[in-house]
Amino acid sequence: MNVLILLGISIICFGLAGRFYSRVIARKLGEDPDHPTPAVRFNDGRDYVPTKTYVVFAHHFSAIAGAGPILGPTMAVLYGFVPAWLWVVLGGIFIGAVHDFTTLFISMREGGKSMAEVARKTLGDKGFNLFIAFTIVMIVLVTSSFLSATSISLTSLWPLAKIGVKEGETFLKTVVKDGIVMGRIGGIASMSVIVITLCSPLIGWLIYKKGLKTVYAYLIASVICVGSVLLGIAHPITMTPTTWMIIISVYVLIAAGAPVWLILQPRDFINVQILYGGIALMVLSLFSTGFSGLRVTVPSFNLHEGVRNLGLIWPMMFCIVACGAISGFHCLVAGGTTGKQLSRETDARRVGYNAMLLESLLAVCVLLAIGAAMSFADYKSIVWPTDPAIKSNPILGFSLAAGQLFNRGLGIPVALGTVFGILLVEGFVITTLDAAVRLNRYLFEELWTLVFKKVPALLRRYWFNSGISVALMWTLATSNAFNVLWPIFGTANQLLAALSLLAVSAWLLLRKKKAAVTLVPAVFMFLTTLASLSILLTNYIRKRNYVLIAADLTLFLLSIGVIGLFIKMFLRKKTEAAEA
């Protein structure tokens, strides 16, 4: 089918959902434009600040989007284009966007509290404790997955012949491997990532300490982005994956304790321009190539290879797509910052629901790029290699597909488009790593207050808690390939979303509101993720992967605990209603 038809159907479905279905959910929640938000009630000029809708949307989208909606669909298209596309579109509309909107809305109604605090209020202290423990495990899995993917992609090589150029006809530096001339694609991105990271403190200082005007900040950030690529072309950096793991681990350990304005926020500021630019280029390229007749060429259904590599399409594909359809990580953003910035309750629908739809649109573009712009054989050789000595490299797989798409649609050289594709993912992978390790540091600090009446001084040190997070990340990443880690991360991420939807449902039921719009997705995601954990546990036992066995069992038991608390709460309210 023509890519333009598939893109058009997706956009129409997302548009109708944002216009109509989001209003249905708003009525169920009791949305009231006159109800004061936490930003208005507690305006302190620091955390609680009434902010224009489009500004909050930009912050929220840059925080939730990134590598997840790119890597997940890239892995899952092995099952075939049709099932992956249907799950991204339908899952995004009826589950993912519902999760994001409802968790954001209830965070606002509860004074800008996190979902862990909402769980405490609806399911008691035990619910809060289980939520904290679950989130720690989930974040360790996401950081280890991203560390593994990053270290491989920053060392990426690809034959010049498959880019359509010969040695001396491209800006890529080359190396001969097994008699084949390979272009050093990853080396350019490596230099760019380093330059952007080193320049982030400068941007942060200019914006937050010197009050630099936004327009000038954007110009400087753009110059840094372009300059970093040019420097990477001239001086690509070549290091082993292990060396990159060490460097990135040391970096996130330092970044987790640095002020947010120094590295974290300015990196987001620079990288979000790359993300917006990447989405725009992909949509423009798809329109251009669609009018030229570009069609999806990967198999519509490829269940035999998908099942052989990943397991049954249900539940595995629904977890592997991950952030493209639904992401539990988003509730951490909703309850962390976004819920404290909205000026009106109606903004929760515009920001929470629509930002997830935009992320699903990005996932659709990724599926179309891989499905139409690169051969299925090349895709499998990169993302699902049969040679055990070759590691899975989904970032390179997506980037090559994007490079081919940009070339066909806009005439951008394949090599340059591929480098941009890697940067599109890499900047956000590393930003996610330092943000997630920082969040895990907070969670460990919270955990110690639950374990000890008087927390020992050592356990209050930021470097100690950050160090635990980095050590766990390192252990999983060095002992497991990316394509081994991603399924359990995707499962944990979707399971966190199910837990959040369950907490939302409890919140609604306690207020005698109908909860079907959240309870049905919660039940579906629980069944899906628990089935996935069962399948993965069997695989880990067979391969004697004791670390992942422990992670799998921990997630399973924590989830059962939360379900038990919800059932207990539901039965108690039912008994009270009968007595009344």
Image: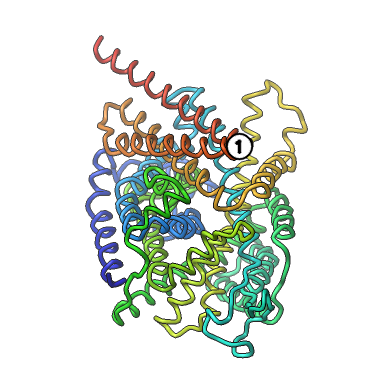
Q: Residue at x 66, y 78 (%)?
A: 179
- Disc 1 on helix, strand or loop? helix
Residue 390: image x %, image y %?
Answer: 61, 61
Whether residue 580 is visible, yes or no, is no
| Residue sitting nearer the eye, 377 or 175 | 377
Q: Residue at x 49, y 38 (%)?
A: 114
Q: Quadrant of residue 174?
A: bottom right
Residue 322: image x %, image y %?
Answer: 44, 50
Residue 489: image x %, image y %?
Answer: 52, 45
Q: Residue at x 41, y 69 (%)?
A: 369
- Up the image or down, 262 lies above or below 569; here it is below
Residue 143: image x %, image y %?
Answer: 60, 49
Q: Quadrant of residue 235?
A: bottom right
Q: Quadrant of residue 9?
A: bottom left
| Residue sitting nearer the eye, 490 or 568 | 490
How crowded pointer 1 is (Cα within 10 Å; few <14, some 14-19, many 20+) is rated as some
| Residue sitting nearer the eye, 356 or 45 | 356
Three-letter code, disc 1: Leu
Mark 1, residue position: 443
